[in-house]
Image (cartoon, rainbow, N blue to C red):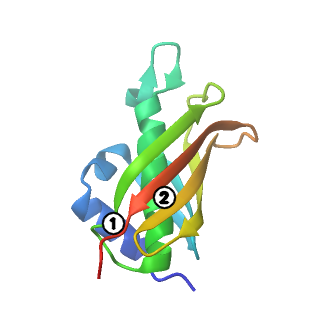
Amino acid sequence: MPKITPREFESIAKDRVPIVNYLGCSIEEIGEGTAKGRAVYREEFLRPGGTVAGPVLMALADFVMYAAVLSKIGRVELAVTTNLSINFLRRPSPNDVVAYASLIKLGKRLAVGEVDLYSDGEEELIAHVTCTYSIPPD
């Protein structure tokens, strides 16, 4: 059973990471070491060429990975990203972006995971992210 609910996580994120409010990110599901989130489409997210901008994709990926990490360690607000690497695989359509995060390894001090990003309603991956979080000592 996850150590945090989507509602608890969103409360932390919206209070402690205010950019989440601007981006309109939400968590739809949290499992043990997994999370599903969404960035609701807005015109401000588009860059020239009519594609969702990379920083929106990176922010959503980091947001859902934070949820996946807290699902295993509980309310440890000072867990922070130490590395995020993204591969942009295809142009996202002007639509909501959906992200699926899963932990690959959870240690005492580091959590490593990956995030798959999709344009809502489409089956083809738009970006793949690997991410490492630092977990503070007890």
Quadrant of the frame with the C terminus: bottom left
- State the quadrant of the N terminus: bottom right
For this view, does 110 lie left or right of residue 12?
right
**Residue 4 location (% of width, % of height):** 44, 79
Taking the image as shown, residue 120 lies to the left or right of residue 50, namely right
Q: Which residue is farthest bottom?
A: 1
Q: Furthest-right residue in view?
A: 123
Question: What x and y, as percent, mark residue 10?
Answer: 37, 66
Q: Which residue is mark 1?
A: 79
Q: CA distance from mark 2 to mark 1?
A: 11 Å
Q: Please, what secondary structure does the residue beneath circle 2 have?
A: helix
Badge 2: few (under 14), some or many (20 or more) residues near its Cα, within 10 Å? many
Residue at point 52%, 13% (across, down): 49
Question: Residue 60: x and y, percent?
Answer: 46, 47
| Closer to the camera in the image, 136 or 74 | 136
**Position of 10 relative to 119 (above/below):** below
First reached walking from the N terminus: tag 2 or tag 1: 2
Residue at 55% from the left image edge and 48% from the top image edge: 130
The answer to whether one can see residue 26 in this image is no
- What is the crowding at mark 1: few (fewer than 14 residues within 10 Å), some, or many (at least 20)? some
Q: Is residue 120 above or below residue 51?
A: below
In the figure, is residue 121 to the left or right of 104? right
Q: Nearer the viewer, residue 36 or 58?
A: 58
Marking on residue 70: none
Q: Which residue is labeled 2 in the image?
A: 65
Residue type of the residue flagged with mark 1 = Ala
Q: Which of 93/53 is in front?
A: 53
Q: Quadrant of residue 88?
A: top right
Looking at numbered disc 2 in the image, what kind of residue is underneath it? Met
* Callout 1 secondary element: loop
